[in-house]
């Protein structure tokens, strides 16, 4: 008697933006280990290639997509190539710091689109298919900056506030559809982001106990998502301190710890 070959079920797909390094790469590696294929979006083709190599050891297939998500064309390209993922981690981002009136307008527009409107457009594009299926998971990587006052980083805080507010409202809208939504608001995370943004002094000046690892952020985000949390702040220190971080004393201490001193400013031409 002839037996029909058993079909191998397709692996679910995790779409991860900002997957070249840091938090995004940690998420991509997590899902590759967890039985997902990964659609990895970033701007560094070599780093995405390295991710694909390491993920293959776990049997995962990584599809690399080099795309600039600070433009509408970049977001449209991702939606065209990966229209129906099972999981989305909206993580791509960079930071701008400096006094009001010192930032380049084009950089402000790019940041606001990347971590604000671009996230909304990406998720508006993928969520209808999730709702039709009756399942899906969305994790928006925002920042603790969206929950506190951030003098010197007002545009960054405002852009991240867009992402947090959108995610909270989207979660409520999709309640009962089988689609989970969680917003992740980390503080300082050990990634190349600060050095790339000309904020390397923070790595040297901010105390070690205020930093969390990308893997800790991933663990907190996935746990919060699966437990139905709306907003997750990784790191015990941040969870305890959050209610006090907008107080005047805390703001003064934070400002003193993160201020670039004159000696560093003379040495570092990238200083804002």
Image (tube, rainbow, N blue to C red):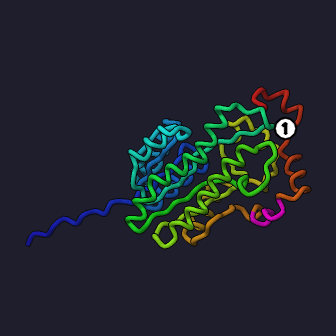
Pointer 1: residues within 10 angstroms few (<14), some, or many (20+)?
some
Residue at mark 1:
260
Q: In which quarter of the image is the C terminus?
A: top right
Q: Quadrant of the N terminus?
A: bottom left
Residue 11 on the magenta segment: no
Q: Residue 270 occupies which quadrant of the picture?
A: top right
Residue 241 on the magenta segment: yes
In the image, residue 64 lies at what x, y percent? 44, 42
Residue 59 seen in the current view: no
Residue 258 seen in the current view: yes
Q: Between residues 220 and 248, which one lies in front from this camera angle?
A: 248
Q: Residue at the left extreme? A: 1
Question: How many badges with numbers are in the image?
Answer: 1
Q: Is mark 1 on a helix, strand or loop?
A: loop
**Residue at point 76% right, 44% down?**
153
Q: Is the magenta stretch mostly helix, strand or loop?
A: helix
**Residue at point 10% right, 69% down?**
2
**Residue at point 79% right, 66% down?**
240
**Residue at point 81% right, 37% down?**
99
- On the rendered structure, is 18 left or right of 64? right
The magenta-colored residue range is: 239-245
- On the rendered structure, is 127 left or right of 111? left
In the image, residue 136 lies at what x, y percent? 45, 64
Please tell me whether residue 135 is drawn above or below residue 96 in the rendered image: below
Q: Between residues 271 and 75, which one lies in front from this camera angle?
A: 75
In the image, residue 102 lies at what x, y percent? 77, 32
In the image, residue 165 lies at what x, y percent? 64, 58
Please tell me whether residue 35 is drawn above or below residue 57 in the rendered image: below
């Amino acid at each position: 008697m002839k037996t029909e070959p058993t079909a191998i079920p397709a692996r679910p797909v995790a779409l991860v933006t900002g997957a070249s390094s840091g938090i995004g790469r940690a998420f991509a590696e997590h899902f590759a280990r967890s039985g997902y294929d990964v659609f990895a979006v970033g701007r560094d083709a070599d780093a995405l290639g390295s991710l694909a190599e390491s993920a293959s050891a776990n049997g995962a297939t990584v599809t690399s997509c080099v795309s600039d998500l600070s433009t509408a064309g970049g977001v449209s390209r991702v939606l065209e190539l990966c229209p129906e993922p099972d999981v989305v981690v909206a993580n791509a981002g960079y930071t701008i710091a400096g006094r009001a009136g010192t930032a380049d307008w084009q950089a402000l527009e790019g940041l606001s689109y990347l971590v604000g409107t671009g996230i909304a457009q990406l998720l508006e594009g993928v969520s209808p298919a999730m709702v039709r299926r009756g399942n899906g998971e969305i994790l928006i990587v925002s920042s603790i900056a969206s929950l506190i006052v951030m003098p010197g980083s007002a545009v960054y805080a405002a852009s991240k506030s867009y992402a947090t507010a959108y995610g909270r409202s989207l979660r409520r809208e999709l309640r009962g559809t089988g689609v989970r939504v969680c917003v992740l608001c980390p503080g300082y995370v050990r990634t190349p982001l600060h050095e790339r943004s000309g904020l390397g002094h923070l790595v040297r000046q901010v105390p070690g106990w205020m930093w969390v690892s990308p893997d800790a952020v991933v663990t907190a985000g996935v746990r919060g998502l699966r437990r139905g949390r709306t907003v997750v702040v990784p790191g015990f220190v941040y969870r305890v301190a959050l209610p006090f971080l907008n107080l005047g004393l805390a703001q003064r201490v934070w400002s003193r710890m993160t201020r670039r001193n004159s000696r560093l400013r003379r040495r570092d031409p990238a200083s804002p």
